[in-house]
Amino acid sequence: MSDNIWGYQETSGHAAGADLIGYKVEATDGHIGKVDKHSDEVDSAYLVVDTGVWIFGKHVLLPAGTVQSIDADEQKIFVNLTKEQIKESPEFDKDKHVGDTGYHQQVGEYYNRNRSA
């Protein structure tokens, strides 16, 4: 596993530049939502997931390092987190998630503590 929580794991199957918007996102214990936005930026790659009715109206920021694998045929992304870990993550802040290193550090530290090997 890569130490960089903000970079895709080599084994994830992610192709740089691939459009992931609309892909379904699956936690280790079930579906959590769909990709609303994503970035492949080096050392700052992430997914913004619209959780829909699961966490009513909430979006979550998932660093790319939480992605375990991507199935392009099924348009599904599998993350190495439980639904509870995602639900308890720092609140998504659409104004801070780009360019705020303190916010990225807070989110990154949370997911580094909670992701599985």
Image (cartoon, rainbow, N blue to C red):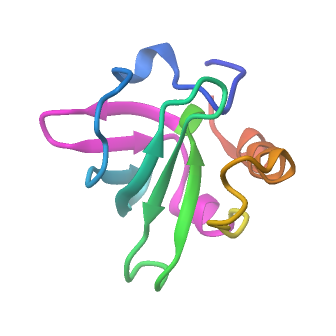
Question: Farthest top residue?
Answer: 10
- Where is residue 61? Give x, y as percent: 58, 55
Q: Quadrant of the C terminus?
A: top right
Name the residue: 83% across, 51% down: 106
Residue 77 sits in quarter? top left
- Where is residue 51? Give x, y as percent: 43, 70
| Residue 116 vertical position relative to residue 50 in the rendered view, above or below | above
**Is residue 37 found inside the magenta-colored segment of the image?**
no
Magenta stretch in the rendered image: 67-88
Residue 97 sits in quarter? bottom right
For residue 105, side relative to residue 117 (left or right) = right
Residue 105 sits in quarter? top right
Q: Quadrant of the N terminus?
A: top right
Name the residue: 38% across, 83% down: 53
For residue 40, side relative to residue 62 (left or right) = left
Depth check: give the residue in front, 83 or 70. Answer: 70
- Where is residue 110? Give x, y as percent: 77, 50
| Residue 17 vertical position relative to residue 56 in the rendered view, above or below | above
For residue 25, side relative to residue 7 (left or right) = left
Name the residue: 82% across, 44% down: 101
